[in-house]
Image (spheres, grey):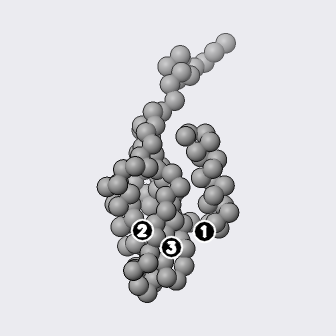
Amino acid sequence: MNFFTRKQQAEPPKERNEIGNRALKENLAEAALGALREKDDYGNLAYTKVEFGYLFQVEGRGTEALFKVTTDKTTVYFAVQGARLMRLNFSEELFQTTVDSFLELHG
């Protein structure tokens, strides 16, 4: 016997790839720089680089993103889930593996 309705089985959340959304990327980068400022993770922002692995809007969940910020002192990895910005303890290898896996499933 099937306990799920057809609607529950048939419709995964709708996703939109937002990697080209400059305004959204700038907002997330600014939030990340605020977090870096609190921890003294940079001396000079002149050569700071932000690289997004993925950036999606998911219906019912909001923003899903993984990105890194490289400063004159360090590289810091961030994830976004909904309205939460989280600093991660990632290596470059884990970042790439996670991005590749996410894009394979959602790209």
For the residues marked 2 and 3, what is the alpha-carbon distance in whole angstroms?
11 Å
Q: Is residue 2 above or below residue 67?
A: above
Q: Earlier in the sequence, mark 1 or mark 2?
A: 2
At label 1, which amino acid type do we have?
A: Asn
For the residues marked 1 and 2, what is the alpha-carbon distance in whole angstroms?
14 Å
Is residue 41 visible to the viewer in this orientation of the structure? Answer: no
Q: Quadrant of residue 26?
A: bottom left
Q: Neighbour class for label 1 at 10 Å: few (<14), some, many (≥20)? A: few
Q: In front: 10, or 72?
A: 72
Read off the residue under disc 2: 32
Read off the residue under disc 3: 70
Determine whether the residue tagged by mark 3 lies in a helix, strand or loop.
Answer: strand
- Identified at 43% across, 87% down, the residue is 43
Q: Neighbour class for label 2 at 10 Å: few (<14), some, many (≥20)? A: many
Q: In front: 21, or 28?
A: 21
At label 2, which amino acid type do we have?
A: Ala
Q: Position of residue 100 (x, y in %)?
A: 63, 50
- Image quarter where the C terminus lies is top right
Contact (Cβ within 8 Å) of mark 3 with mark 1: no
